[in-house]
Amino acid sequence: MGRVSAVPAGAVIKRNPLVGHGLDRQQAAPEEQHSEQMRRAREALYQLTLSADGRTVQFEGEITYGLKARLTQIIEDTPDLRVIHLGSPGGHVFEARGAAQVIMGAGLETTVSEACSSACTLLFMAGTRRHLDPQARLGFHGYGLSEWVHLPGYDIDAAQEKDRVFFLAQGMQPGFAARIFDRPPKRCGTPIMLNCGPQGF
């Protein structure tokens, strides 16, 4: 006969919410595995590489979900970090805004040696000091939604204006800021390019 544990009078017995709904730990595991697989898949789209002296982190690849959290962790773990070097064709605007705020909060400088386009420009403009190598280019174009994204209430013009205000606050010349979203998003492969000239920042 099995042992029976006594329950004190007035005690509240808490039931496992997974039990009784057919959701035990073994059934929940596939969801956790899928979440982990998605995280790894997103992280595979970009690289964050620390320099040997811990003063520079290099970001290369696509801006996707999770970048803000990883960048935050690197900054917390690397107190001597001063510069983030950027090389990216862009990606998710919302994640780029979050990463830009992290860069600003940490007071990092931003540098580009080749190309930083689309949402990457938000990261570049977040730098306390910004540097473009002679051959470097920044690429700008209008915003758009991916074919598989359906957001009928999303206001693209408002989103562009929000980031235009950010660019102006960070020192972009008004004349250039007025036309950074003129290039249609379908032509994002050839965005408006800007080198480190008098139109600058």
Image (cartoon, rainbow, N blue to C red):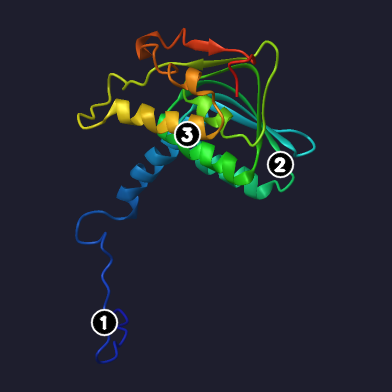
Tell me the tag on residue 12: 1
Which residue is painted at 61% across and 13% down in the image? 195
Q: Is residue 45 visible?
A: no
Circle 2 SS class: loop
Residue type at mark 1 is: Val
Which residue is painted at 23% across and 30% down in the image? 151
Q: Tell which tag, 1 or 2, sits nearer the viewer.
A: 2
Which image quarter is the N terminus in? bottom left
Query: Which quadrant would residue 13 be assigned to in this image?
Result: bottom left
Disc 1 vs disc 2: Cβ atoms closer than 8 Å? no
Observer-nearest of 71 and 43: 71
Q: Tell which tag, 3 or 1, sits nearer the viewer.
A: 3
Estimate the x, y position of residue 72 in percent, counting from the top left: 57, 45
Q: Is residue 56 visible?
A: yes
Residue, disc 3: 166
Please report whichever mark, 1 or 2, sits nearer to the chain's N-terminal start. Answer: 1
Q: Residues within 10 Å of mark 2 (few under 14, many from 20)?
A: many
Which residue is painted at 52% across and 41% down in the image? 101
Which image quarter is the C terminus in? top right
Tell me the tag on residue 72: none
Please report whichever mark, 3 or 1, sits nearer to the chain's N-terminal start. Answer: 1
Which residue is painted at 30% across and 26% down in the image? 156
Query: Which quadrant would residue 20 be assigned to in this image?
Result: bottom left
Residue type at mark 3 is: Phe
Residue 10 relative to residue 136: left or right: left
Estimate the x, y position of residue 127 in percent, counting from the top left: 61, 34
- The Cα atoms of the two marked residues, 2 and 3, are separated by 24 Å
Residue, disc 2: 81
- The Cα atoms of the two marked residues, 3 and 1, are separated by 53 Å
